[in-house]
Image (spheres, grey):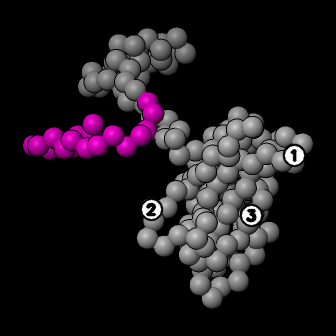
Amino acid sequence: MFTADGGIPLVRYAIGDEGGLVSHADMLALCAEHGFTPPDGPQLPFVYVFGRSLFTVSYFGANVYPENVAVGLEQPEISATVTGKFVVESVEDADRDRTLRITVEVAPGAVADAAAIAESVRAQLVRLNSEFAHYVPAERQLPEVVLRPAGDPEHFPAGVKHRYTRAQPSR
């Protein structure tokens, strides 16, 4: 539930973010344990949000968020060739090695460069996602990019709500 700073509170549906509340007193105690004394202010609880784990893919223990991948596709040298739709998966090969696979929808009439997209996404993941930058070995950070035409029925069917992540079945 969320509310606005106004006369009528706004109640919304559950959006799937994970987090919680910390009381004002508990937060001050935590700050004091770490040598920080914040200035006086309203004695309200603190809210923390971690994001939506149901919409992430775990890769080498790092949560890969669709919004981080999207930034890689929004770069000027990439954005004109893709629609912005993609699917992120952590796939396992026969040797049980994992690869981060990103299937990207190519814009109608465009020619996309999978290698350039992979490098752009890697750069943004390293820049925006500290888990990815620190947990994923450098030699495994470049994702495998698979290009699909607009409206591809397997990944981007028309008229169906798009999903940005896909879980690989367990063995």
Residue at the bottom extreme?
109
Q: Is residue 133 magenta?
A: no
User: Is residue 84 visible in the rendered structure shown here?
Assistant: no
Q: Residues within 10 Å of mark 2 (few under 14, many from 20)?
A: few
Q: Secondary structure at mark 3?
A: strand
SS category of the residue bearing label 1: loop
Q: Position of residue 25 (x, y in %)?
A: 35, 13
**Towards the viewer: 146 or 45:** 146
Residue at 63% x, 46% y is 167
Q: Secondary structure at mark 2?
A: loop
* Residue 94: mark: 1
The residue identified by callout 2 is: 161
- In the picture of the structure, the residue carrying the numbered disc 3 is 145
x and y percent of residue 59 in the render? 71, 41
Q: Amino acid at mark 1?
A: Ala
Q: Which SS type dominates the magenta stretch?
A: loop
Front of the two marks 3 and 2: 2
Residues packed near mark 1 inside 10 Å, few (<14), some (14 to 19) or many (20 plus) = few
